[in-house]
């Protein structure tokens, strides 16, 4: 009862108190309610802003083991803006992304390589990537893992004829042997990779990449760790046609 009496006295004193006293009382008893409410409202506003301003993905490529030559620039290279215009992609509402954050060194598998490998696996599983652009050595393992389209399945006859001189091949027999070794948990198996540019030396050649080695739009803007540049189009790509168009665009200049 004494507590209730004390509470009534406080309420009565508050009723007759100054505005400053009333504010101090309110803040003392309700400050955490106010703080939590402000945080929740801020999170809701932030979510709504990000959702309403989120751009559509027009094309998403990972540039494995590559980096921008101009590290200080936050702008996309000019050729991507030009390609977007030719492709009819509005960069005010859609994004073309070249992700250079993934670096994997197979021989060392340091912390960066492990994290990057996990990140790449998540991206691929979530259908977030359309293509990989990288050097020949970095591409080899992934090219022989059934990750990329057989280009004969997505190119027109006209495109096949035009792009065939730039094809990067894998031998299906080698791919099947790797898969069999993985199924048998055979960690001692070491595949012998044939030259990807000489399909005549393979038992069952499959074109899985488009060589972009001489494309100055890439070499003038990006550093690639190894020799050669090749693009593979993921078999679960949502924008495979755009990837083909990009390859044609780069090779035409």
Image (cartoon, rainbow, N blue to C red):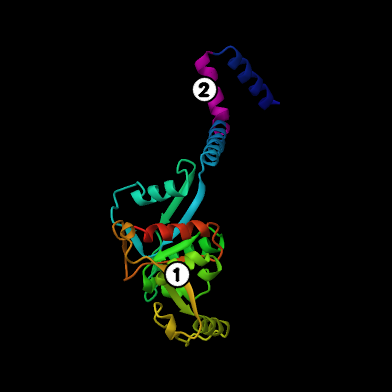
Number of callouts: 2
Which of the numbered marks, if any, corresponds to residue 72? none
Which of the numbered marks, if any, corresponds to residue 209? 1
Secondary element type, mark 1: strand
Determine the image quadrant of residue 167.
bottom left
Residue of label 2: 24
Region in magenta: 18-33
Q: Residue at x 43, y 48 (%)?
A: 86
Mark 1: few, some, or many residues within 10 Å (few <14, many ≥20)?
many
* Position of residue 60 in the picture relative to residue 153 (left or right): left
Q: Residue at x 29, y 49 (%)?
A: 72
Q: Residue at x 43, y 67 (%)?
A: 163
Determine the image quadrant of residue 180.
bottom right
Q: Residue at x 51, y 39 (%)?
A: 53
- Closer to the observer: label 1 or label 2? 1
Residue 91 lies in the magenta-colored region: no
């Amino acid at each position: 009862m004494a507590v209730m009496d004390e509470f009534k006295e406080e309420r009565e004193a508050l009723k007759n108190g100054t505005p400053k006293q009333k504010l101090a009382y309110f803040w003392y008893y309700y400050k955490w309610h106010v703080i939590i409410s402000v945080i929740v409202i801020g999170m809701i506003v932030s979510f709504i802003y990000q959702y309403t301003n989120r751009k559509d993905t027009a094309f998403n490529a990972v540039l494995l083991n590559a980096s921008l030559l101009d590290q200080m620039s936050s702008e996309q290279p000019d050729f991507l803006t030009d390609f977007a215009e030719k492709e009819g992609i509005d960069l005010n509402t859609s994004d073309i992304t070249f992700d250079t954050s993934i670096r994997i060194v197979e021989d060392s598998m340091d912390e960066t390589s492990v994290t990057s490998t996990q990140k790449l696996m998540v991206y691929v599983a979530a259908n977030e990537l359309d293509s990989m652009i990288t050097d020949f050595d970095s591409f080899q393992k992934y090219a022989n893992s059934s990750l990329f389209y057989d280009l004969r399945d997505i190119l027109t006859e006209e495109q096949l004829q035009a792009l065939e001189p730039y094809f990067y091949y894998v031998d299906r027999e080698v791919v099947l042997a790797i898969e069999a070794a993985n199924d048998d948990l055979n960690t001692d198996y070491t595949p012998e990779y044939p030259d990807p540019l000489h399909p005549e030396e393979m038992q069952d050649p499959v074109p899985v990449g488009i060589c972009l080695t001489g494309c100055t739009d890439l070499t003038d803007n990006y550093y690639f760790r190894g020799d050669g540049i090749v693009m593979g189009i993921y078999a679960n790509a949502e924008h495979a046609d755009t990837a083909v168009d990009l390859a044609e665009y780069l090779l035409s200049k």
